[in-house]
Amino acid sequence: MTPACAGDRYRRRSPIAALIAAENDRPHTLLLRWAEQDCTVQQFANLARRCATDLTEHFGIRAGDRVAIVACNSVYRLAWQYGAYWIGAVEVSVNFELKGSMLDHIITDSAPQLILADDDLIGELTGYAGDTRIESLGAPSSTSDTVDVAALDSGEATIPPDQLATILYTSGTTGPSKGVMLPRAYFANHADSICESLELTAGDIGYFVLPFFHVDAHIVFPAVIESGSALAFNQRFSVRGFWPEVEQFGCTWVFVIGSVLSAVATVTPPTRDSIPIRRILGAPIPEPAYRFFEDDLGIPILSMYGQTEADGPTFERLDKRKRGSAGFACDAFEVAILDSAGHHLPAGEVGELCHRPRYPNMVTSGYWNNPEATVESYRNLWFHTGDLGRIDDEGFLFYSGRITDSLRRRGENISAHELEAIVRNAPGVVDAAAIAVFDELGGEDEIKVIVSCSEGHALDVVAFFTYCERALPRFAVPRFVEQVDPHVFVRSVGTGVIQKHRLSKRVTGEGVTDRLGDSSYAQQ
């Protein structure tokens, strides 16, 4: 552990406490960098306090109230989030690409007292907000002169570390997306592991490529605050902008998902001497990314395993890593591979990846409005991830896929249940099943949808994909579709669930259309 992250490990109280400490110790240190602009620790703390003042004085938000944030990456996105934390309100972090029934479910389920959104997203939200107030997410109206710093800071210090701070919605497998409840100390505690893995020190500048609504952003930013380093970002990630921005921002490390690395590997990099990056952290890591970044450019890649519910139990370090692994258990967690009966499996055998924390406030406190799912996730004193893995005889975890029926594409978890419900409303479609097929580029999933249509009707693939592009967020639009006879859908007795293991994963041949690569579709 580096000196910048020293102290009582995994006993943090909140990211606000860390920010106040950083403001006292190094107020003028660079904290955020974007589009040729810089923000110091003190400037960000002042901005977040102004947001906190607006929330209480202008919008009537109190501790425990839910504030939904629907916005692209920006300093204001972070400042309103931290303003909510400052007064003990609950941030509901919403994917800004959601639309239709997926967006409706989150707004209805979380029932926020206030929605803050980018101006260009307010129109999409108005149909689902009901009587909930929607405000533009931008500069707060409160000025520094009107902020009562002493009252805000002393009030924040009384909020317990286990109080609910954020609800993040993650993929459901047999139902709609679930709201993962995360306590205040969760973010700062997991930040400690990020600090250790990346060996963050003062002067480091990270490049964060994911949207800020991700759980990863919720722990990376506190890690930056804790370590005295800084974070660079753009409103939206661009593959071709990666190398110019890394050089422009002077980034010494990068946090990514594997598909980003694969995409960046297709772009000619600068000369090796001009690349400031010294390490990369992300997951999952495709083999081509190792060859490009490690073998060709000499930049070490560190991997990890994490979910919204616990981000994450395993990490690699520069002095302890194994290519292709997802790291080893950090000091805050026990990690085990269990069989279906809950018994431990020996090294090398594949089973369900389970974990449990050694300290409080390291995992979700449950699922919002879903006590059944909360109880189901904890069995025999272990949190059951629904993922498959194996642990070798040196303690390294290797990820082996998912038990649960969810899909993961471009770093986003997608509920197959929700996607299928929407696809069944496509023109001519009667029934549908969504499955994952391997994406050679990103090392993750592409989505294939198998559909049946009304008797005697052929699927209009142009109308189908047009509908999907309108009704689904970009990351959830299927790449492949195949029409089959209804009898192909074999259902389990009792539940009626389609037995997806019986469905074809072929992505070429008669009856299969590739939205991106099928010339006959592209010409229509």
Image: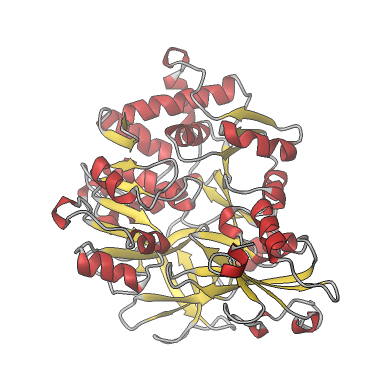
Q: Quadrant of the C terminus?
A: bottom right
Colouring of the image = secondary structure
Q: Say which quarter of the image contains residue 434.
A: bottom right
Left or right: where does residue 58 sit relative to residue 442?
Answer: right
Residue nearest the observer in this picture, 418 or 271: 271
**Residue 255 visible to the viewer:** yes
Rendered view: 471 above or below 62 = below
Residue 39, percent from left and from top: 33, 30
Residue at x 34% of width, y 35% of height:
35
Q: Quadrant of the N terminus?
A: bottom left
Check the image and name the residue furthest to the right.
Answer: 455
**Residue 387 visible to the viewer:** no
Check the image and name the residue furthest to the front.
Answer: 523
Residue 56, percent from left and from top: 58, 24
Residue nearest the observer in this picture, 293 or 385: 293
Residue 415, percent from left and from top: 64, 62
Rendered view: 478 above or below 38 = below
